Every structure is written in C-alpha cells, then in structure tokens.
Amino acid sequence: MKHIVVLTGAGMSAESGIKTFRDADGLWEGHDVMEVASPQGFARNPELVLDFYNQRRRQLKEVQPNQAHNDLAELEKDFKVTIITQNVDNLHERAGSTDVVHLHGELQKIRSTGNPKDIRVWTEDLNLGDTCDKGYQLRPHIVWFGEDVPMIETAVKICYAADILVIIGTSMQVYPAASLMDYVQPDTPIYYIDPKPAISNNGKVNVIAKSATEGMKDLISLLK
C-alpha cells in the first residue's frame, strides 16, 4: 500500500470558517500575531493571550470539517495516509483521519509553564490562576513564534518515507514546516493544492491552483 504524506496549512481549514492570519496583513482575528502567539506576548499580557485562545477553542466547537478533510480521511481506504499539519484545530481527526502529526500544537490541549511534558486535553476556557499540580500557570499547547518545533524531526522522517507528497493550503513560508518538501526522495511525486500557489509548476511539483475542496477532487482523479 502506497504511503501518501500530506502537509496541510491554514488554507485547509479556511473553508470550514477558520480564519488564516497570513491573508490579513499579519493580523490574526484582529490581533498582531506577536501579541497572541509569542512567549513575549504571553509574558506581557497573559490574560489577553488566554482569552484569545479561549475564543479560538469556542469557535472550534462551532465549525465542521469540510469536504477536503473528509476526502483525505477517505483516502485511507486505498492508501496509508499520514497528515502533517501546521493547523492547531482538530478537523482532520473529526473527519476520520487516523494518523495526524500536529507541528504547531493543538488548540484542545494545554500544558504547564513549568513542566513542558505536563500536557493535558482541555476543551473549555483556560484562565489566569489555572495551575498544574506543582502550582505553575497552565498555557495553550501551541508552538509560538520563537519556540522550538518538537515534532519537526518526526515529520522529516515521515517525509523521507513518503511514496507521494501532497501539500494543501500553505504559503510555504513558515519554517521549518516549509522545508519538509525537501526531505522526500528525489523521484517522489509532489502535488501542491493552493488557490494562490507560492510555487510554480515545474518538473518536480504538480500545482493544482484551486481551493482545498476543489483541488482534492482533482487529486483524487489523478491518484486513481
């Protein structure tokens, strides 16, 4: 069974109603990203940051996986599929995908500021004063700007073993995630689905300049 590795970015979830910040002058839901997605922002104004992610967590309960999420889950009937996502939502899992690696953390998890290994599922609001067993403030389990990406080495190994690489809805400008396509074998077919592709069609990359849902239809017909 061929192994398809799928890299997904914000454009994957945009059609479910989750806003991307790269399309809006660096603003994420009206906030400068460094205010709400950096250790410095959290140190300056932890209440603002906690409230921001509380709103994202609530929003997540109101949206549904779109057809592109569903189509990726369906591919598991015919292929081994591993999804490496930059997204912090759980829409891939809710659509039925069984092998998902989150590079940038997960919205419905939190961790201790004093013990990075103390990670727990958290689906409600997180407030100032919510602490771990050792008394440290709890924070969103999100990889912020300037922080290490702990799953990147796992992702590199997965890409190295890919028979087919599919990239969906990412600007290919966020590193180290954008470098993952460089780790597939030289003869591995690469498909790139994005309405505003950052890479042009060349001998190595097959560009499908469409939204995630429309592009997935094309991809499925190409894979058959």
Image (cartoon, rainbow, N blue to C red):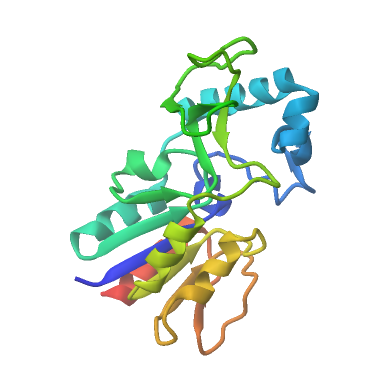
Asked if 192 appears above or below 68 in the picture, the reply is below
Which image quadrant: the N terminus?
bottom left
Q: Which residue, as the protein is rendered here, is positioned at the far front? A: 134
Residue drawn at point x = 48 percent, y = 38 percent: 89
Relative to 146, 213 lies left or right = left
**Looking at the image, can residue 143 be seen?**
yes
The foreground one among 78 and 2 is 2
Q: Position of residue 181 (x, y in %)?
A: 51, 72
Q: Position of residue 122 (x, y in %)?
A: 45, 22
Residue drawn at point x = 53 percent, y = 29 percent: 115
Q: Position of residue 77 (x, y in %)?
A: 19, 59
Relative to 95, 33 lies left or right = right
Q: Position of residue 197 (x, y in %)?
A: 62, 69
Asked if 119 appears above or below 51 in the picture, the reply is below
Q: Place residue 32 in its image quadrant.
A: top right
Q: How many marks?
A: 0
Q: Which residue, as the protein is rendered here, is positioned at the far top? A: 129
**Looking at the image, can residue 30 be seen?**
no
Relative to 108, 144 lies left or right = right
Asked if 176 appears above or below 57 in the picture, the reply is below
Q: Place residue 154 in its image quadrant.
A: bottom left
Which image quadrant: the C terminus?
bottom left
The foreground one among 108 and 203 is 108
Relative to 139, 167 lies left or right = left
Asked if 155 appears above or below 93 in the picture, the reply is below
Residue drawn at point x = 41 percent, y = 41 percent: 91
Residue drawn at point x = 41 percent, y = 62 percent: 6
